[in-house]
Amino acid sequence: MPANRSVLLRRGLAVATALPLLTLAACGYGSDSKDENTNAKVAAGAEKIDDLSSVRIGYFGNLTHATALVGKQQGLFQKELGATKAEYATFNAGPSEIEALNSGSIDIGWIGPSPSINGYTKSDGKSLRIIGGSASGGVKLVVNPKKIKTLKDVKGKNIATPQLGNTQDVAFLNWIADQGWKVDAESGKGDVSVVRTDNKITPDAYKSGSIDGAWVPEPTASKLVAEGAKVLLDESDLWPDKKFVITNIIVSQKFLKEHPKVVEAVLTGAVKTNAWINANPEKAKAAANAQLKIDSGKALKPEVIDPAWKSIQFTNDPLAATLNTEAEHAVKAGLLKKPDLVGIYDLTLLNKVLKAQGESTVDDAGLGVK
């Protein structure tokens, strides 16, 4: 890979290092902020796990991170942690969350596949492990119906993605290649103009006419639809069984080694949260929106959150085979050297929790710790 491309990849996929992961609807970029607003209360008589005072959990204020949003809002993590306090930090993009994990500012985080891959490979497999899944789906190609009526009409148009090398950017570049079209991955120029645009400003860019559409996560996609855009393609339709990873749970390897019981408690909270979300979708949607309002100061309108929520599946399965495929897409696009992902997963504690809850275990597609 040429030096300039390698630098751009590190910059972009390091920016992808946490990429919005899509950040389901993404966020902006940059800083993280402590947020202690929560309904959780430590039960009387509760004890600390491993005598640990607190565990620091990171996530994005996006619907694809609804397991974290709902688990926090409903106090489900704190219930499992006893007197070990759940402390939270919200992030605007993947790079800052990976940096926080590497520096020890957070211990566990909800994050997308591209930042997980980049964080792991940049550290030579020493920084993190993926310990669970969280969400699938929630990514769409939405377009101006006056300019684009069919998939073939995308050629020659300006289409936004959240960031160079992020999960959605890689997916769109791969889709473009599958159409037989050519685009320079770094500049975004070619048969389609790929316009890297912060999800926070993508709706304004659409309204101004500077972009003709966007390949974006929810709720950005539904925000564009509320502005008159139409869904041209749901990315889930491109995947076997319509499932692909959009959000993982990661942990620093140091914290996993030193505090496995705390990690197990957080995973138990996540599994129970997903069960509650799937059993109570309307209540869960309201809880997620309530936490979004706390985190951002603004709740999503019904015309945005309703369709966005329907397009996301909440699952404990990390869908490991799809993460490997997403890495292959990044390699094909020239944004990543072929990575060795063996060891990126450690699903031991998750499967222990799933068995205890009477649920089916999941596998790591051969990418687990040996």
Image (tube, grey):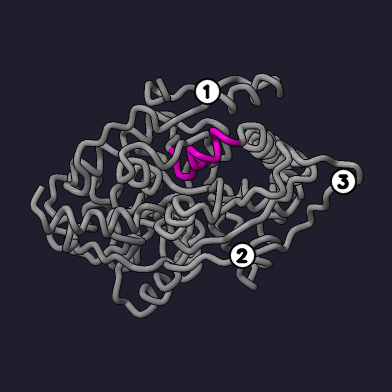
Q: Secondary structure at mark 2?
A: strand
Identify the amino acid type marked 2. Lys
In reply to whether residue 64 is colored magenta, the answer given is no
| Image location (x, y in percent) of residue 318 | 48, 33
Residue annotated with mark 3: 43
Give the residue at the far left of this rendering.
2
In reply to whether residue 255 is colored magenta, the answer given is yes
Identify the amino acid type marked 1. Val
Q: Earlier in the sequence, mark 2 or mark 1?
A: 2
- Name the residue located 46 percent from the left edge and 36 percent from the top edge: 129
Location of residue 16 by image quarter: bottom left
Q: Is residue 137 visible?
A: yes
| Image location (x, y in percent) of residue 31 | 48, 68
Disc 3 and disc 1: Cα gap in Å?
32 Å
Disc 2 and disc 3: Cα gap in Å?
23 Å
Label 3 neighbour load within 10 Å: few <14, some 14-19, many 20+: few
- Name the residue located 39 percent from the left edge and 23 percent from the top edge: 365
The answer to whether the residues at label 2 and label 1 have Cβ atoms under 8 Å apart is no
Q: 184 or 366: nearer the eye?
A: 366
- Name the residue located 55 percent from the left edge and 23 percent from the top edge: 348
Residue annotated with mark 2: 34
Label 1 neighbour load within 10 Å: few <14, some 14-19, many 20+: some
Residue annotated with mark 1: 362
Start and end of the magenta stretch?
245-258
Q: How many marks?
A: 3
